[in-house]
Amino acid sequence: MSDLDRRTDEELMNLCVEGSEEALGELVKRYKPRIVSVVYRYINDPIRAEEIAQEVFVRVWVHREKYRRTARFSTWIFTIALNLTKNEIRYRVRHSKVMSIEGLKEMGSNVGFFLRDRSRDPQEKLEESELQEVVGKAIASLPTKYRDAVVLRDIEGLSYEEVGEILSIPGGTVRSRINRGRLILKKRLEPYVSC
Amino acid sequence: MKCKAARRLFSAAFDGELSASEERQFKEHLAACAICSREFVLFSRSVELVASLPRPSSSPLFEEKVIRALGEEETGPRRRPELPVPLAAPRPALAFAVALVLVGLLLVAPWNQSDWESALVSRRVERSEVAMKELAKSATDVADLAGMEKRSLTVATLDGIDSASSERQSLFGEELSLWKSKARIVAGGSTENAIALLDEVAYSDGAVFEIEFVLDPFLFEGAEVRRLDASSLTAEEMELASATF
């Protein structure tokens, strides 16, 4: 189909339900960067983040008939992504028995892996990548309930309503978690921002 | 509007989600309060900094791998790929060490500092009905801990802590309290004593608690205690939750 790029996500998903792999391809094109990004902010492992993101699209296809046509596709796919990511965390913990602080630091050290901008001069590039590493680590170290809300809101730009739908929490809780998470980040990032 | 109420509205103000009356009160407060005004600027800049993080790039073979995985899905079940990097080997004492490190982080923070600090301590201990009963019957067991000053302890029952409930307490002066069902255990004196007391309580009753200490005059001061052992979290997940805080 040539008009796939003009279709809404939900229309594409309906085509997937009818068996259109081309429609899935268009959804992959639209959501790949966002799904890789949200998974990466959780596990700080760029290779595994991409594998999980691929698995997310496989699940979308396999479970396409379970998709409720009245639901927003974005909330459905982010819910799948968060569930798979949390499964990954459980899997890692189960296979490592206890996650060491050193292991977590090692995971955190990958934060800056993708964040370099090759168009800048070396010094500026270094400073920017260091700052991005600091921000990435600050996000990764948030307590889970605040990280869920902040990543979906500030990294993915979802509305409060969408965040609530994905996390299955009421609007008031969404607001308080976003505010609390941001206040924690503000405290940790204060040395890097100025008035 | 007071500073604490204003700071609860920071996110909604940043996102343009305030009602007309909230917005008016919020702006009036910022105009009159230089500290909150500066805090809101810093808050806004830190949110912008987080939001400005570039997305990670993905492999040009991404779509191809999805298609291949779909094909494998149709021809049979796939095996889970191995982790690319082996994680740390099991260490029997690590659970205790992680908790110690986190408690240590708390100890370096002044108890009454006006700034924000919080920490999370999670414990996994063997369930001990005997220890629970002993704690319930005697306040002395807690008070006798070295260096502790027991301010109050009233025990009705320790059986009523709901896994879904959490209770928050306020800090008064240099006290830190912990509610266990209807028992309020208050630790006074030094920070070390207060933390050690709550730590001991968490150990002695044989349950698994998550204790979050929050010292923030603008948000909430005290400890939020959640019982986790009755939930679906495994002990290993608890350890991860501790270490990632």
Image: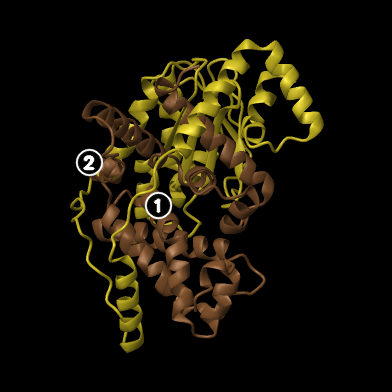
Q: Which residue lies at the image location 58% right of the left edge and 41% below the top edge?
A: A177
Who is closer to the viewer here, A109 or A50?
Answer: A50
How far apart in space, not on screen, are marks 1 and 2 (Cα)?
24 Å
A33 versus B227 height, above or below: below
Q: Identify the residue at the far front of this view.
A: A2
Secondary element type, mark 1: helix
- Give the class, few, some or many, for how many residues have Cα within 10 Å of label 1's Cα (few <14, many ≥20): many
Three-letter code for the amino acid on which mark 2 is drawn? Glu
Q: Identify the residue at the far right of this view.
A: B21
Q: Which residue lies at the image location 62% right of the left edge and 17% below the top edge?
A: B37
Colour displayed for chain A in the image of the structure: brown
Q: Looking at the picture, how far across and down is residue A51, in whole percent? A: 31, 64
Instruction: Please tell me whether mark 1 or mark 2 is closer to you in this view.
Output: 1
Q: Answer with mark 1 or mark 2, whichever residue precedes in sequence.
A: 1
Who is closer to the viewer here, B40 or B88?
Answer: B40
Query: Could you say which disc has been placed on residue A102 in the image?
Result: 2
Of all chains in the rendering, the one displayed in yellow is: B
Query: Could you say which disc has been placed on residue A37 in the image?
Result: 1
Residue B151 seen in the current view: no
